[in-house]
Image: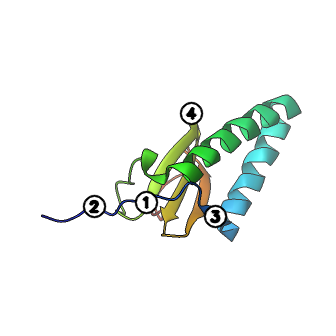
Amino acid sequence: MKQRKVFMKNTYKLIWSNEALEGLKEIFAYLEFKFSEKDAQVFAQKLDKHLKIIQSNPETFRLSLKSKSVRRCVIAKLTSVYYTVSEESIKLITIIDNRKSPKNFIG
């Protein structure tokens, strides 16, 4: 029987990839352009809440369908964060608009 890896830290260090930072910038720019600064703030609060959950309990969210080492957290109806977990840290791979074509995407 294969033993499951259990993560027992209280919180993990978050590491942002360049792709995740770019995705975040694009999403905020879109929200501020199409909606309002208030909508962008509401999204920021949702993102912060979900990142805290990921940091404290990274296994809360499902593994992606394409990669068994990548997890997916849906932040809002149209936005997801993909991340990997190591013993010391969580790497945020990307933050995407779920409406984008996933052709070359790992998630």
For badge 3, the amino acid type reads Lys
Query: Circle 4 sits on which residue?
Result: 77
Marks 4, 1: nearer the viewer? 1
Q: Is residue 87 above or below residue 53?
A: below
Q: Label 2, on which residue?
A: 4
Q: Residues within 10 Å of mark 3 (few under 14, many from 20)?
A: some
Q: Amino acid at mark 2?
A: Arg
Q: Secondary structure at mark 3?
A: strand
N-terminal of the pair, mark 3 or mark 2, is: 2
Q: Quadrant of the C terminus?
A: bottom left
Q: Mark 4: which amino acid?
A: Lys
Label 2 to label 1, Cα distance in Å?
10 Å
Do the residues bearing badges 2 and 4 touch, measured as CB atoms within 8 Å? no
Which of the two discs, 4 and 3, labels the residue nearer the N terminus? 3
In the image: residue 76, left or right of residue 23: left
Pointers 2 and 1 in contact (CB under 8 A)? no
- SS category of the residue bearing label 2: loop
* Side (left or right) of 13 relative to 21: left
Q: Which residue is mark 1?
A: 7
Which residue is situated farthest in the left direction here? 1
Q: Residue at x 85, y 29 (%)?
A: 38
Q: Report the residue marked by disc 3.
A: 13
Mark 1, residues whose alpha carbon is within 10 Å: few (<14), some, or many (≥20)? some
Can the viewer see residue 14 in this picture?
yes
Q: Is residue 65 above or below residue 98?
A: below
* Element under disc 1: loop
Q: Contact (CB < 8 A) between labels 4 and 3? A: no
